């Protein structure tokens, strides 16, 4: 049996996410947007809660089509507030629209969100090699810097802990434990 990061062991959905996605470098803007939105909804909750609702989020938010989301009318927001398949937080739902608009502005300025976000790490993932997931910090100075920049650009619910989790999920940071079989693969 392959050794995995301790945080995912024991839950099939968590393990599949860990084995196939977590820490794999992302370059597609729509995938970046999906993780950004999912991480913002996770603020104050556990990641497994969001992961279990991920397919519902995809359906409810038009497969994370940020161009469409940027133009959601109030009646769509009202419908989302009634959607039991997602996390029904009024501020986070409204922030999704705001974040889609800010996301598009970054694309216009940098050519893509991918160009923008990878610029913070000079195009190369940060590899931390932790011995145990329990010693991995919740944020780092770079996540604080990115958080401040995103907020300056109009993003909401992008504190430094949310940003660090986003960095881990999208492969900007590789925090797989040294003994994890995914450590060298990503």
Image (tube, rainbow, N blue to C red):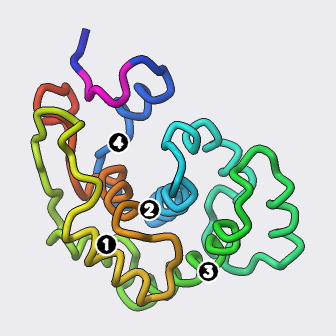
Report how far apart the C-alphas of labels 1 and 3 lie in the structure: 18 Å
Give the residue pinned by disc 3. 98
> What main secondary structure does the magenta stretch of the protein show?
loop
Residue drawn at the location 30% of the way across and 46% of the way down? 24
Q: Residue furthest top?
A: 1
Mark 2 and 4 residues: CB-CB less than 8 Å, in contact?
A: no
Which of the two labelled residues, at mark 1 and mark 3, occupies the earlier sequence position?
3
Residue drawn at the location 26% of the way across and 24% of the way down? 4
Q: Residues within 10 Å of mark 4 (few under 14, many from 20)?
A: many
Give the residue pinned by disc 1. 117
Which of the two labelled residues, at mark 4 and mark 3, occupies the earlier sequence position?
4
Residue drawn at the location 35% of the way across and 86% of the way down? 110
Mark 2 and 1 residues: CB-CB less than 8 Å, in contact?
A: yes
Give the residue pinned by disc 4. 22
Considering depth in this image, is 138 or 9 the residue closer to the camera?
138
Mark 1 and 4 residues: CB-CB less than 8 Å, in contact?
A: no
Say left or right for 74 vs 127: right
The percent coordinates of residue 25 (x first, y second) are 29, 52
Look at the numbered disc 2 and give the secondary structure of its residue: helix
Look at the numbered disc 4 and give the secondary structure of its residue: loop
Residue drawn at the location 65% of the way across and 41% of the way down? 53
Say left or right for 163 vs 66: left
Report how far apart the C-alphas of labels 2 and 1 lie in the structure: 9 Å
Q: Quadrant of the C terminus?
A: top left
Give the residue pinned by disc 2. 32
Considering depth in this image, is 34 or 38 the residue closer to the camera?
38
The percent coordinates of residue 103 (x first, y second) are 50, 78
Q: Please provide the residue range marked out in magenta.
A: 4-9
Which of the two labelled residues, at mark 1 and mark 4, occupies the earlier sequence position?
4
Q: Residues within 10 Å of mark 3 (few under 14, many from 20)?
A: some
């Amino acid at each position: 049996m392959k050794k995995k990061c301790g945080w995912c062991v024991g839950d099939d959905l968590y393990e599949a996410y860990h084995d196939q996605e977590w820490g794999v470098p992302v370059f597609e803007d729509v995938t970046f947007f999906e993780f950004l939105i999912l991480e913002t909804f996770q603020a104050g909750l556990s990641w497994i809660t969001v992961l279990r609702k991920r397919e519902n989020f995809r359906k409810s938010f038009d497969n994370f089509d940020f161009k469409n989301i940027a133009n959601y009318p109030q009646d769509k927001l009202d419908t989302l507030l009634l959607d039991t398949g997602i996390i029904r937080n009024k501020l986070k739902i409204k922030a999704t629209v705001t974040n889609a608009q800010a996301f598009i502005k970054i694309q216009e300025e940098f050519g893509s969100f991918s160009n923008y976000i990878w610029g913070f790490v000079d195009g190369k993932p940060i590899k931390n090699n932790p011995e145990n997931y329990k010693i991995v910090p919740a944020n780092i100075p770079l996540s604080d810097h990115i958080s401040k920049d995103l907020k300056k650009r109009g993003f909401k619910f992008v504190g430094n802990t949310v940003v660090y989790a986003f960095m881990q999920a999208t492969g900007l940071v590789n925090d797989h434990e040294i003994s994890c079989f995914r450590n060298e693969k990503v």
